[in-house]
Image: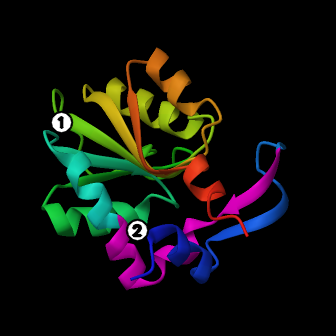
Amino acid sequence: MVNLVEALVEKGALKFGDFTLTSGKKSSFYVDLKAAFTDPVLLRRVVQRLVPYTAGVQRLAGTELGAVPLLVALALETGLPYVILRKKARGHGTGRAYEGEIRAGEKVLLVEDVATSGGTIQRAAEVLRGEGAQVERAVCVVDREEGGAESLREMGIGLEAVLRSRDLQSERP
Protein backbone atom coordinates (compact mmCIF):
# COMPACT_ATOMS: atom_id res chain seq x y z
CA MET A 1 0.00 0.00 0.00
CA VAL A 2 1.25 3.46 -0.91
CA ASN A 3 2.09 5.66 2.09
CA LEU A 4 0.14 8.87 2.65
CA VAL A 5 2.85 11.22 1.35
CA GLU A 6 3.24 9.15 -1.84
CA ALA A 7 -0.53 9.17 -2.28
CA LEU A 8 -0.55 12.98 -1.99
CA VAL A 9 2.19 13.24 -4.62
CA GLU A 10 0.31 10.87 -6.94
CA LYS A 11 -2.88 12.91 -6.55
CA GLY A 12 -1.02 16.14 -7.35
CA ALA A 13 -1.66 17.56 -3.88
CA LEU A 14 2.07 17.77 -3.13
CA LYS A 15 4.37 19.33 -5.68
CA PHE A 16 8.09 20.07 -5.60
CA GLY A 17 9.76 23.02 -7.33
CA ASP A 18 9.90 26.79 -6.78
CA PHE A 19 6.68 28.29 -5.44
CA THR A 20 5.54 31.61 -4.00
CA LEU A 21 3.11 31.12 -1.11
CA THR A 22 0.17 33.35 -0.21
CA SER A 23 2.38 34.98 2.41
CA GLY A 24 4.87 35.95 -0.31
CA LYS A 25 7.47 33.54 1.04
CA LYS A 26 9.31 31.22 -1.34
CA SER A 27 9.04 27.46 -0.87
CA SER A 28 10.54 24.36 -2.47
CA PHE A 29 7.23 22.52 -2.14
CA TYR A 30 3.54 23.32 -2.46
CA VAL A 31 0.68 21.58 -0.68
CA ASP A 32 -2.81 21.75 -2.22
CA LEU A 33 -4.87 19.34 -0.16
CA LYS A 34 -8.12 20.45 -1.78
CA ALA A 35 -7.06 18.34 -4.76
CA ALA A 36 -6.63 15.32 -2.49
CA PHE A 37 -9.93 15.85 -0.72
CA THR A 38 -11.93 15.44 -3.93
CA ASP A 39 -10.90 11.78 -3.88
CA PRO A 40 -13.09 10.02 -1.28
CA VAL A 41 -10.61 7.18 -0.77
CA LEU A 42 -7.74 9.55 -0.02
CA LEU A 43 -9.97 11.81 2.08
CA ARG A 44 -10.98 8.79 4.18
CA ARG A 45 -7.31 7.83 4.67
CA VAL A 46 -6.52 11.33 5.91
CA VAL A 47 -9.58 11.47 8.18
CA GLN A 48 -8.74 8.12 9.75
CA ARG A 49 -5.41 9.65 10.77
CA LEU A 50 -7.29 12.61 12.34
CA VAL A 51 -9.79 10.59 14.39
CA PRO A 52 -7.46 9.98 17.39
CA TYR A 53 -7.07 13.75 17.87
CA THR A 54 -10.81 14.11 18.52
CA ALA A 55 -10.68 12.38 21.91
CA GLY A 56 -12.11 14.55 24.66
CA VAL A 57 -13.77 17.20 22.50
CA GLN A 58 -17.46 17.91 21.99
CA ARG A 59 -17.28 19.81 18.71
CA LEU A 60 -15.09 20.31 15.65
CA ALA A 61 -14.44 23.64 13.95
CA GLY A 62 -12.56 24.88 10.92
CA THR A 63 -12.37 27.68 8.42
CA GLU A 64 -13.77 27.68 4.90
CA LEU A 65 -12.65 26.34 2.37
CA GLY A 66 -9.76 24.02 3.17
CA ALA A 67 -11.14 22.55 6.38
CA VAL A 68 -14.71 21.94 5.19
CA PRO A 69 -14.22 18.50 3.58
CA LEU A 70 -12.20 17.44 6.63
CA LEU A 71 -14.90 18.64 9.02
CA VAL A 72 -17.71 16.87 7.18
CA ALA A 73 -15.82 13.59 6.81
CA LEU A 74 -14.51 13.72 10.39
CA ALA A 75 -18.00 14.46 11.73
CA LEU A 76 -19.41 11.49 9.82
CA GLU A 77 -16.63 9.28 11.17
CA THR A 78 -16.91 10.41 14.81
CA GLY A 79 -20.48 11.66 15.20
CA LEU A 80 -19.20 15.02 16.45
CA PRO A 81 -21.01 18.19 15.36
CA TYR A 82 -19.01 20.93 13.66
CA VAL A 83 -18.83 24.65 13.01
CA ILE A 84 -17.62 26.27 9.80
CA LEU A 85 -15.97 29.63 10.37
CA ARG A 86 -16.10 32.19 7.61
CA LYS A 87 -12.96 33.98 6.50
CA LYS A 88 -15.02 37.14 6.69
CA ALA A 89 -18.34 37.75 8.48
CA ARG A 90 -21.34 37.99 6.20
CA GLY A 91 -22.28 41.49 5.16
CA HIS A 92 -25.97 40.58 4.93
CA GLY A 93 -28.57 38.46 6.69
CA THR A 94 -27.40 37.52 10.18
CA GLY A 95 -23.88 38.85 9.65
CA ARG A 96 -22.53 35.79 11.45
CA ALA A 97 -18.89 34.82 11.27
CA TYR A 98 -19.74 31.11 11.38
CA GLU A 99 -22.29 28.44 10.51
CA GLY A 100 -23.32 25.89 13.09
CA GLU A 101 -23.77 26.03 16.83
CA ILE A 102 -21.20 27.06 19.40
CA ARG A 103 -22.03 26.30 23.02
CA ALA A 104 -20.30 28.07 25.88
CA GLY A 105 -18.00 25.74 27.78
CA GLU A 106 -17.69 23.13 25.02
CA LYS A 107 -14.26 21.80 24.17
CA VAL A 108 -13.68 22.44 20.49
CA LEU A 109 -10.96 20.98 18.28
CA LEU A 110 -9.84 23.27 15.48
CA VAL A 111 -9.17 21.39 12.25
CA GLU A 112 -7.04 22.81 9.42
CA ASP A 113 -5.66 21.46 6.17
CA VAL A 114 -2.27 23.23 6.11
CA ALA A 115 -0.75 25.30 8.93
CA THR A 116 2.01 27.78 8.17
CA SER A 117 2.04 30.80 10.47
CA GLY A 118 -1.02 29.68 12.42
CA GLY A 119 -2.91 32.87 11.56
CA THR A 120 -6.06 31.16 10.28
CA ILE A 121 -6.25 29.00 13.39
CA GLN A 122 -5.65 32.03 15.64
CA ARG A 123 -8.50 33.98 14.05
CA ALA A 124 -10.83 30.98 14.31
CA ALA A 125 -9.89 30.45 17.97
CA GLU A 126 -10.66 34.09 18.75
CA VAL A 127 -14.17 33.76 17.28
CA LEU A 128 -14.82 30.50 19.13
CA ARG A 129 -13.48 31.80 22.42
CA GLY A 130 -15.55 34.94 21.96
CA GLU A 131 -18.60 32.67 21.98
CA GLY A 132 -17.43 30.91 25.16
CA ALA A 133 -15.91 27.77 23.63
CA GLN A 134 -12.79 26.17 25.09
CA VAL A 135 -10.12 25.94 22.40
CA GLU A 136 -6.95 24.28 23.62
CA ARG A 137 -5.98 22.11 20.65
CA ALA A 138 -5.77 22.26 16.89
CA VAL A 139 -4.86 19.60 14.37
CA CYS A 140 -3.77 19.98 10.78
CA VAL A 141 -2.98 17.56 8.01
CA VAL A 142 0.30 19.33 7.17
CA ASP A 143 2.34 21.59 9.43
CA ARG A 144 4.78 23.53 7.25
CA GLU A 145 6.81 24.12 10.44
CA GLU A 146 7.11 27.85 9.82
CA GLY A 147 6.22 29.16 13.27
CA GLY A 148 2.55 28.23 13.51
CA ALA A 149 2.94 25.86 16.46
CA GLU A 150 4.92 28.46 18.39
CA SER A 151 2.48 31.32 17.79
CA LEU A 152 -0.46 29.09 18.73
CA ARG A 153 1.31 27.95 21.89
CA GLU A 154 1.42 31.62 22.95
CA MET A 155 -2.40 31.57 22.76
CA GLY A 156 -2.60 28.40 24.83
CA ILE A 157 -3.33 26.18 21.84
CA GLY A 158 -1.35 23.03 21.08
CA LEU A 159 -0.91 22.21 17.38
CA GLU A 160 -0.69 18.59 16.31
CA ALA A 161 -0.13 17.38 12.74
CA VAL A 162 -0.57 14.23 10.71
CA LEU A 163 2.40 15.26 8.55
CA ARG A 164 5.15 17.84 8.99
CA SER A 165 7.33 19.63 6.48
CA ARG A 166 10.22 17.26 7.24
CA ASP A 167 7.99 14.27 6.35
CA LEU A 168 7.20 15.80 2.97
CA GLN A 169 10.81 16.71 2.25
CA SER A 170 11.83 13.08 2.76
CA GLU A 171 9.76 12.18 -0.31
CA ARG A 172 11.29 14.85 -2.50
CA PRO A 173 12.44 13.36 -5.83
Rounded to the nearest whole Å, what is the CA distance between mark 2 and mark 1? 22 Å
The image position of residue 14, as x and y in percent, is 64, 68
Label 1 neighbour load within 10 Å: few <14, some 14-19, many 20+: some
**Disc 2 residue type?**
Pro
Residue 40 is situated, as x and y percent measured from the top left of the image, at 38, 83
Going 60% across and 58% down the picture, which residue do you hit?
168
Q: Secondary structure at mark 2?
A: helix
Which residue: 65% across, 35% down?
A: 146
Work out whether residue 4 or residue 152 is closer to the camera in this orientation and state it: 4
The numbered mark, 2 or 1, whose residue comes first in the sequence reads: 2
**Total tally of numbered discs in the picture:** 2
Q: Quadrant of residue 148?
A: top right
Q: Quadrant of residue 108?
A: top left
Report the disc number at residue 137: none
Nearer to us in this view, 52 or 38:
52
- The answer to whether residue 52 is visible is yes
Quarter of the image that includes the C terminus: bottom right
Q: Amino acid at mark 1?
A: Arg
Crowd class of label 2 (few under 14; some 14 to 19; many from 20; radius 10 Å): some
- Disc 1 on helix, strand or loop? loop
Look at the image and give the residue range highlighted in magenta. Answer: 26-46
Which residue occupies 55% across, 47% down?
87
Mark linked to residue 103: 1
Residue 161: x, y in percent? 43, 46
Relative to 2, residue 83 above or below? above
Quadrant of the rendered image containing residue 56: top left
Q: Which residue is mark 2?
A: 69
Residue 20 is situated, as x and y percent measured from the top left of the image, at: 84, 53
